[in-house]
Amino acid sequence: IFFAAMFLLSLLIKLISKRNIQSFIAISALTSLIIMADVVIFKYMLKHSVLGYDPMIGARFYGIGNEFTGVFIGATILLACSVIELLGSRISMATKKACLLLYFLSGSLVIGLPFWGANFGGTIAALVGYSFTYIYLNKIRINIKTCAIVLGIFILVFSVLLIIDMRNTDSTSHLGSFFRDVSKNGVAVLLGLVYRKLTMNIKLIKYTIWTKVLFCLIAILTFMFFRPIKILGKIFVRYKVLTAAWVGITAAGITGLLVNDSGIVMTATAMIYMCYTILMICLDEIKVK
């Protein structure tokens, strides 16, 4: 049933999409909107999906896990940039900036709010990825002012999440638990947290199948820098808006790897949206030649 459904869905998207960019929009919109609806309203897929809660590996049983967080971050960034790539100059700069800010803020809240995603590390990764995408898209210079604004947005988002979390004593958010732990036991908790996340990621590199996925993606991208000759450079120049998506997804993936217990899982699922879109565009470039 699963493979039949995927085949029919892929065939339908192929038939209605004349260009790769339209396929990207269809796939990323379908994926991100379904995950968003499930996290906010239904909470069915989180419980029963292959990427959902898992007693065999001791995965979380609340909010959104790192598997779906990586998928959600990759899909939302790809969707935003694909729409802008398709519309081009038909959308004004002011409208683009306002829509991006609202869209990225909504995505961060879906991941971070304690009664929805409740994923603190995922929220950090999402904010970093969204920030890099926004800065790259709007050609904003990275200076002290830009860093201060980004830091202010981070503080604002986490303050909102923390206030909501602290008002709800039954919340299971990592942010609220961390704040309570630091208040009770001091800054030493931070060192223990860093050590725990580091050792867990090292252990997962050995045991999780997502390590193989991530290494395969990295190997593919590395190979494509050399074969076909210079094709990636041409793609980055021609598809500057999509390049912003790839930069944002990479930044989110690296951040997710650093700040999460099972960060390699989040990194691998997010990087899928970077690697395969580049591959599809490369295939088109080769056909044109």
Image (cartoon, rainbow, N blue to C red):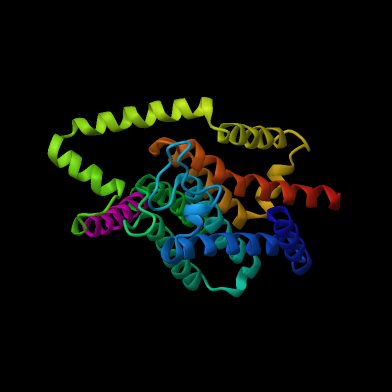
Residue at the farthest left position: 184
Q: Which residues are magenta?
A: 146-165
Q: Quadrant of residue 170?
A: bottom left
Front-lying residue, 105 or 162: 162
Q: Residue 214 placed where, x, y %?
A: 59, 35
| x 20%, y 55%: residue | 169
- Find out whether residue 153 is within the magenta segment: yes
Relative to 220, does residue 135 appear above or below in the rendering?
A: below
Q: Is residue 139 visible?
A: no
In-image side of 217 versus 190 (left or right) = right
In-image side of 185 versus 139 (left or right) = left
Front-lying residue, 127 or 169: 169
Q: Residue 17 placed where, x, y %?
A: 74, 66
Q: Residue 217 placed where, x, y %?
A: 64, 37
Q: Quadrant of residue 18?
A: bottom right
Front-lying residue, 289 or 192: 192
The main secondary structure of the magenta stretch is helix
Q: How many marks?
A: 0
Q: Residue 27 placed where, x, y %?
A: 64, 60
Front-lying residue, 221 or 46: 46
Relative to 273, does residue 267 appear above or below in the rendering?
A: above
- Find out whether residue 114 is within the magenta segment: no
